[in-house]
Amino acid sequence: MRILFLNVRKKSIDCRNLLKMARRPHVIILAELLQGSQTHYETGLHKTHEHMSRPTLYSRSRHIRIYSKYELEADRRTSLRGNRLKNNWVRCRIKGITISAVHMPTRAKKRKPFADLKRWMAKHAKSRTLLIGDFNTAPSDKKWGPQLKTWTEFGWRNLWDGTPGGDKAWTFKGTRKSDRRRRIDHAFAGQGLGNAKLTHLPDFRVKRLTDHSGLLVTINQGK
């Protein structure tokens, strides 16, 4: 199974181009969707990825959604009161694999979401689960970077560690002159997904379709 994560930065990328650049993934996770862009992707992907997670059209502007060739066995969102990831943390089970997709807030708004994620990560480390998303956090971030390290201590595998050049890769560069190149998009595999591999897809960013690289995770279900 090939799983793509991409922060589209509220843009409506041509779906045929998206599929080609992402190497025809079976599951597509798009973050930072507006109401109009959700409609765009629903229309453009319905022939190839007819199964979709629940829409969040009337809440915050930075929505996240999953599009799949395969039936969604489960479709859940975090609904805890006060959790700022309420509409930006969606979990679907597809072909026996739980895919947990996240778009983390920025700056001071991270405290509560990271606390909720930490409890969840501690509980599900041994499962067939993929956690993937835009965490707005670089490993070098002195305040929030250690949170990513904590998850590997629970037993999760940081897929960047097995990616050629992953220690030097960066996935985001904003439009402001003061913005630095950072690796803020991440993927972690539970112990039940020992064969999961990550491929960095910078073309989405290089071709200015969005300001993020894509992450493509491949899981060999035959093992």
Image (cartoon, rainbow, N blue to C red):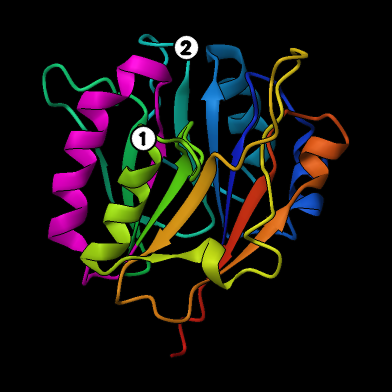
| Residue assigned mark 2 | 61
Seen at 40% across and 29% down, the residue is: 104
What quarter of the picture does the N terminus occupy?
bottom right
Does the rendering let one see residue 1?
no
Residue at label 1? 144
Identify the image quadrant of residue 124. bottom left
Please tell me whether residue 70 is drawn above or below residue 13 in the rendered image. Answer: below
163, above or below 29, in the image: below
Q: Nearer the viewer, mark 2 or mark 1?
A: 1
Residue at 18%, 35% in the rendered image = 115
Q: Which residues are magenta?
A: 100-129
Q: Which mark is residue 202?
A: none
Label 2 Cα crowd, 10 Å radius (few <14 / some 14-19 / many 20+): some
Residue 178, percent from left and from top: 71, 15
Q: Nearer the viewer, residue 34 or 117?
A: 117
Residue furthest out toward the front? 142
Where disc 1 sits, the SS reads loop
In the figure, is residue 26 to the left or right of 121? right
Is residue 111 one of those drawn in magenta?
A: yes
Q: Which amino acid lies under the numbered mark 2 shown in the image of this protein?
A: Ser
Say which residue appears at 78% left-offset and 36% top-offset. Answer: 205
Quarter occupied by the C terminus: bottom left
